[in-house]
């Protein structure tokens, strides 16, 4: 049975890579917002974005942080990780830099955001959460690795401790 997940990622830079991940049968992710829909949510303010995130994370089996070259620098990704952590939702990270964007090709590996975020009581979140790197020799091999192992990665998600 397919797992239901919330994808956290850097939209502008990685949306084409995320579209490939969404095509993997082992999991069901939330529908991606079209740019105009995102602008509509964003235009209603920060609370509207927070409400959208809470709504989309409700009832998912895991929050999957799709890690590209700049994902760890994104404020909303950090917010999504913290929200999942504090609400005890299972979290897992998966590097996607090895997938080829049709416009720009593959990318360089980004920092794991879990190792850059702290819990006041427990310390660095990366100590408690799994991150996987299915990168192959090229974009096609990386996709095949993701296709083969994504269900396993989601099963390795660990609940937030916050």
Image (tube, rainbow, N blue to C red):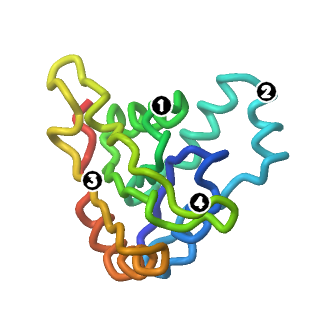
Residue at 50 percent of width and 54 percent of height: 7
Real-space CA distance between mark 3 and mark 2, rounded to the nearest whole angstrom: 33 Å
In percent of the image, x 41 and y 70: which residue is there?
A: 3
User: Cα distance, mark 4 to mark 3?
Assistant: 20 Å
Residue 79 vertical position relative to residue 94 in the rendered view, above or below: above
Of tags 2 and 1, the one toward the viewer is 1
Residue 137 image point, x, y percent: 37, 74
Say which label, 3 or 2, has the lower sequence index.
2
Q: Which mark is residue 55?
A: none
**Residue with the mark numbered 3:** 131
Q: How many marks?
A: 4
Circle 4 Cα neighbour tier, 10 Å, few/some/many (<14 / 14–19 / ≥20): few
Residue 16 sits in which quadrant? bottom right
Using the image, tell me which numbered label, if any, was put on residue 73: 1
Q: What is the CA distance from the residue labelled 2 to the residue labelled 1?
A: 23 Å
**Which residue is more in the foreground, 79 or 101?**
101
State which mark lies toward you, 4 or 3.
Answer: 3
**Residue at the spot x=45%, y=72% of the render?**
27
Please, is residue 121 above or below residue 42 in the view?
A: above
SS label for mark 4: loop
> Height in image: 105 above or below 51?
below
Q: Nearer the viewer, residue 104 or 85?
A: 104
Tag 1, which secondary structure? helix
In depth, the one of 98 and 72 nearer the eye is 98
Q: Residues under labels 1 and 4: Cα distance? A: 22 Å
Q: Is residue 85 left or right of residue 67?
A: left
Image coordinates for residue 44, horizontal then vertical, percent: 79, 27
Q: Can you see residue 120?
A: yes
Q: Position of residue 33 (x, y in %)?
A: 72, 52
Q: Which residue is mark 4?
A: 30
Q: Within the image, what quadrant is residue 145 found in?
A: bottom left
Q: What residue sits right under mark 2 in the picture?
A: 44
């Amino acid at each position: 049975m397919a797992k239901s997940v919330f994808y956290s990622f850097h939209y502008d830079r990685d949306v084409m890579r995320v579209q490939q991940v969404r095509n993997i049968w082992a999991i069901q992710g939330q529908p991606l917002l079209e740019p105009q829909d995102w602008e509509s949510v964003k235009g209603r303010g920060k609370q509207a974005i927070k409400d959208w995130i809470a709504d989309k994370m409700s009832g998912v089996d895991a929050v999957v942080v799709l890690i590209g070259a700049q994902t760890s620098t994104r404020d909303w990704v950090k917010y999504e990780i913290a929200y999942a952590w504090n609400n005890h939702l299972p979290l897992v990270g998966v590097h996607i830099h090895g997938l080829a964007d049709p416009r720009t090709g593959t990318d360089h590996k980004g920092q794991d955001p879990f190792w850059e975020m702290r819990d006041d009581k427990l310390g660095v979140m990366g100590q408690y959460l799994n991150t996987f790197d299915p990168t192959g020799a090229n974009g096609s091999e990386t996709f095949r690795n993701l296709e083969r192992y994504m269900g396993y990665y989601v099963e390795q998600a660990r609940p937030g401790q916050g």
